[in-house]
Amino acid sequence: MKLKLDLHDIFNKGQQIDKALRGIIDEAIDKKAAMVEIIPGKGTGALKKKVIRFLDQKEIKQLYHRIEKDGDNWGRLFVHFRHDAPTGRRGRGR
């Protein structure tokens, strides 16, 4: 499953951007989505930088596996999730 967040409509509304980003991350975790596509658009690149800064926050960064910048469309990012990542307690109960 892949989720998508297009930020074009709220590009200049800082708090709404953070809320939308947190919402899509939470939804991906709840639905066990493998990836979230975030579209900040091309523009000046300021919104993409804001999205990356948001994703780099310690409490957010621990929720996903990695970020991928689209090589064909620099106005798009992919956030990858691993929902089956080991917790350090493998083999418990076996």
Image (tube, rainbow, N blue to C red):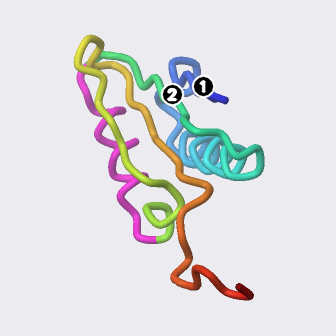
Amino acid carrying mark 2 in the image: Glu
Residue denoted by label 1: 4
Earlier sequence position, callout 1 versus callout 2: 1
Mark 1 and mark 2 in contact? Answer it, CB < 8 Å: yes
Image label count: 2
List x then y, in percent, for residue 90.
Answer: 58, 80
List x then y, in percent, for residue 14.
Answer: 50, 43
Q: What stretch of residues is rendered in magenta? A: 44-58
Front-lying residue, 23 or 94: 94
Quarter-of-image position of residue 43: top left
Callout 1 secondary element: strand
Quarter-of-image position of residue 2: top right
Numbered badge on residue 37:
2
Q: Residue at x 54, y 35 (%)?
A: 35
List x then y, in percent, for residue 46.
Answer: 28, 33
Residue 94 is left or right of residue 85, and the answer is: right
Callout 2 secondary element: strand
